Amino acid sequence: MNENKNQDKKEINPQKRKDIIKNFLIVFLIILLILTFFSNTIMNRSLPEIATESSISGSLTEKLNASGIIESNQSYEVKAKSNSTIDAIKVKTGQEIKKGDVLFTINNEENTELKEAETLLKSMELEYQKMLLTIPKDYATENQAIKNAQEDLNNLIAKRDEVASKQAENDAKKSEYNQAKSELSGISSKLADIQMYMTAVNTDDIYSIGSEYTKNIIGYYEEYIKAQSDLQSAEADLQSFMMSPDVSEEVMQSLQDKVNQCSDYFNDCESRYKSEKNNLRDTLSNELSYLNGESNRLNAVITDYESNLSSDDMLTVDALDEQITAKQRELETLVIALEDTKKQDNLAIQTNDIDVKAKHEEIEAQKLVVEKLRKKDSEKEIKAEYSGVLSEILVRIGDNVLPDEAVALIDISEEGYTMTVSVEAEKTKKIKVGTPVEVLNDWSNSIQADLVEMKNDSKDKKNRILKFRVSGDVNSGDTLSVSIPCSTSRYDTIIPKSALNEDSNGKFVLIVKSKSSPLGNRYFAERVDVEVLASDEVSCAVQGNLNMGDYVITTSSKPVNDGDQVKMKD
């Protein structure tokens, strides 16, 4: 039986094996298809989902957008008039105010300004009383000085007349005196020469004696000197030959005779020279005696003149005339100075009168100030002096305020509003003053803005200042956004602003590229670098390797980079 079973098994196995293999392959293919389908679905679920728009060509109006703070053309500060405490605030910021409206109620404190004004008034009144007290001018000192100068002038004139009457006698004495001084000067010089000559005679310095005294003595002196020299020479020769044993008596006698001859001649010359020198000495002595006598005489004349000379004798008519002229000028100066002093004093009196009048007017004005402060001190409200819009409240309830301290700021709406913004100068090249302006954040359609001025920005040379005139439902401090159309042009490639990206390499867009696969088309992001030519609020015109009709990615569920696979929105 077992054998039959084994035999049957051997007969069935090949067919069953084929069936098993077939079934296994079928199951494997089914599982592979299922896995392939689900893997594509899983991958699609992990891909970033994108939205795209196609690039187009057409016209684009470039606009410059700017925002700034609105300022009032004219505003004024509401100020307290005295020391006070804010009890209540009757208005709120942005409220329209009319002239006379009550803005604050106050409780006045001790008014130090009033006290200061009253103290100042008392001080001014005291000063005014002092100004009324003046000392009259008598000019006694100036008149006495003029009187003394006149007397001095009269005395000088009398002295000049007296000197003029004695002028001839004084001139003769003075001439004799001057002559004596002149002669004495010459004699003194000559005396010095004679003294020097006397010394020269005694020292045989004959050549230093004046020629008027030497006469023949120089010749005698020169003969004497020569004879002395010849004698000394002959004696020297004799002495020289006496030492030689070979000299004959004849030669020695001849030399001795020559010495004797020279000695006799020398004695004669010496006698004549000494005689002439004694004569010269006597002549110089006599001259010296004469000059000493003349010197004594002239000194006596000079001493007599100088001892009898008074200060009046030294005066001359010319010198006194000069003193008289100087005294007359001094007198005239004193008279003119007195007249000037009187004029200045008179001017000072008139000025003082003016000052007194002005001080009186100041006192009257200060009285009005005191009266006004007293009136302010009694006021319990702060009111608006002009109509407008309350732009800012500067105090709170309970605050203490001082006189002239600002408590609120009111814009005078009738004067209008302005807005100034600083923008890049390059962006302003296509706009000009008067270009229509669109207000972007005007929800009530009641605001109008006009470009009225463009100028360079002094703080930033790369920028320009745009000034807008603003009217409508606005307040000072509001922020306003405006759009200014620059130019309208036609461009080949226009894309949404949302598609534009930028990194360190510049601006770019991501376009969608499709690739076929067995399971269908797949989509990939590709970077395209672009240059922006113009833009408005939603679109921009670009230039680059981008064609009209290319799909650019505008949004994505995840960050997308160049080359990433993406999934299109259904």
Image (cartoon, rainbow, N blue to C red):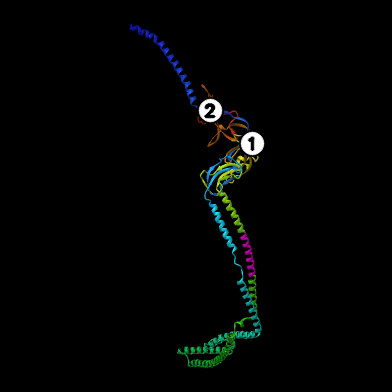
Frontmost residue, 290 versus 446 = 446
Number of numbered discs on residues: 2
Frontmost residue, 499 versus 509 = 499
Residue 239 to residue 545: above or below: below
Q: Position of residue 387 (x, y in %)?
A: 61, 43
Overall secondary structure of the magenta stretch?
Answer: helix
* Amino acid marked by disc 1: Ser
Frontmost residue, 356 versus 322 = 356
Q: In screen coordinates, is 237 left or right of 497?
A: left
Q: Tell me, yes or no, whether the highlighted magenta stretch contains residue 362.
A: no
Q: Position of residue 265 (x, y in %)?
A: 53, 92
Q: Quadrant of the N terminus?
A: top left
Is residue 381 shown to the viewer in this render? yes
Query: Which residue carries the number 1 mark?
Result: 487
Residue 483, quarter of picture: top right
Q: Residues within 10 Å of mark 1 (few under 14, many from 20)?
A: few
Q: Earlier in the sequence, mark 2 or mark 1?
A: 2
Q: Position of residue 275 (x, y in %)?
A: 55, 93
Which element is circle 1 on?
A: strand
Q: Position of residue 194 (x, y in %)?
A: 56, 87
Residue 150 to residue 245: above or below: above
Question: Which residues make up the magenta segment?
Answer: 337-357
Q: Residues within 10 Å of mark 2 (few under 14, many from 20)?
A: many
Frontmost residue, 341 versus 5 = 341
User: What residue is drawn where x is 62% and y is 62%?
Assistant: 352
Q: CA distance from mark 2 to mark 1?
A: 33 Å
* Amino acid marked by disc 2: Ile
Residue 476, quarter of picture: top right
Q: Which mark is residue 50?
A: 2
Which element is circle 2 on?
A: strand
User: What residue is drawn where x is 57% and y is 50%?
Assistant: 375
